[in-house]
Amino acid sequence: MAEMNPFKIAQQQLDESAKKLGLDQATHEFLRWPQREYRFTLPVKMDNGRTRVFHAYRVQYNGARGPTKGGLRWHPDETIDTVRALAAWMTWKCAVVNIPLGGGKGGVTCNPKEMTETEKERLARAYIRAVARELGVHRDVPAPDVYTNPQIMAWMMDEYETILGESHPGVITGKPIAIGGSQGRGDATARGGVYVVREASQKIGLDPTKATYAVQGFGNAGQYAATLHNEILGGGRLVAVSDSSGGVVNKDGIDPEEIVRFKLETGKVSGFPGTKAITNEELLELDVDILYPAALEGVITDANAGNIKAKLICELANGPTTPGADEILHGKGTLILPDFLANAGGVTVSYFEQVQNTYNYYWSLEHVHEQLDRRMTDAFNAVFDTREKAKAHMRLAAYMVSVTRVAEACKLRGWV
Ligand code: GLU
């Protein structure tokens, strides 16, 4: 079904913007497809001595604006189409924050929750051995995403440098700080999202210090969104949180720091003292001002969009809203901060990390925050202005900004 295939959705979103922009046919067709894609079969020795075979991908969607850039996701449901969609969204993401990078994405179909650290290390190194010749600071640069983390980036960088026999810290971002990572990369995705919530709230007259908010998905982005909303905006009441094993709610408020601690200690949010259990689906329909979907794609569909009460949706996840749901929400006047704008903070600080790696000189945390705030605020304003001028909804406006920039680069290169 087109509705649930993320790549079909990504193409459909592009089609809508191409039409609105009056994009010429060749450029439109070119931008509908990845420029290059790789599929790998990776045999990995497990701790019990048996070999397991993993299927893996890397998609280099569009490199007109610079080396392709994007995370590596390890998930049981990964397919070539999820990776293609995510790579397309990376292209629009780098363009909307106006960083000189193209879009790419990688994926391995696996369940890291059932793997030991040594098995993960062997898988990480196997992946790099397969893809190394296609990567490089000036080619394609991976980073963390769902179920991958700085430790996995460290193993990957080490494998890459071992193969080349040279130092190449900029080949991968989201590294631990001790080996060339940037200050502020850890919470950058959520921080960027909260910066755009701050800007959007002003536009719609919502006081974020009095607003209630709920977070769906409690990995890196969700955990930091819960705490940074209060820290950056100076208030707000977190009322519900969920992860893949279920959710919890307390209308009087949940202490963000405490629930993050609980999650880190127990591995889930369920059972957090003073809360009632709810499902992920129920969380999305709660009567809150701001919703942060921070898990996976396809959770807000035309089946539940009509019941969503939030005034503002900050999409920290990639692709959480299907096109059918988009239409319903826009019709109701919900302001959506679309994924590739709302969650662009991560790749923006990845770009800062690469810049620092290149000149081998490192910035302070304050400098990273200042630069990130400027990029996110400028991106929000570019999209919001386009929304007003073109009378488009936010996602379409974001596409219009990004597609215009990528199309210009393709044309200047003489590709189309
Ligand atoms: N995986 C993150 C994203 O989807 C970050 C990508 C990067 O830093 O390259 O935006």
Image: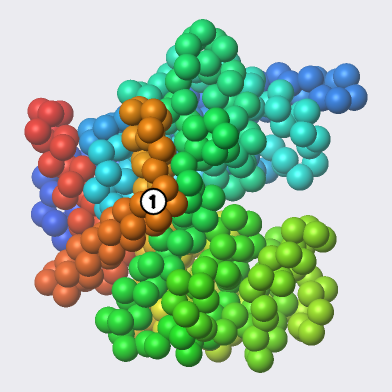
Residue 39 vertical placement versus 85 (above, below): above
Of residue 367 and residue 408, the one placed in the foreground of this image is 367
Residue 47: % across, % down: 86, 25
Residue 74: % across, % down: 62, 40
Image point 58% across, 26% down: which residue? Answer: 156
Q: Residues within 10 Å of mark 1 (few under 14, many from 20)?
A: many
Q: What element carries label 1?
A: helix
Image quadrant containing the C terminus:
top left
* Ligand 1 within 8 Å of the CB at mark 1: no
Numbered-mark total: 1
Drawn side of residue 59 relative to residue 282, left or right: left
- How has the structure been colored for display? rainbow
Drawn side of residue 359 relative to residue 253, left or right: left
Whether residue 163 can be seen here: yes
* Snapshot quadrant of residue 151: top right
Drawn side of residue 408 relative to residue 74, left or right: left
Residue 243: % across, % down: 69, 64
Image point 46% across, 54% down: which residue? Answer: 188
* Snapshot quadrant of residue 382: bottom left
Of residue 76 and residue 114, the one placed in the foreground of this image is 114
* Snapshot quadrant of residue 154: top right
Drawn side of residue 402 relative to residue 249, left or right: left
Q: Which amino acid does label 1 sit on?
A: Val
**Can you identify the residue that label 1 sits on?**
368
Whether residue 297 can be seen here: no
Residue 202: % across, % down: 30, 82
Farthest residue, direction right: 48
Image point 59% across, 47% down: which residue? Answer: 146
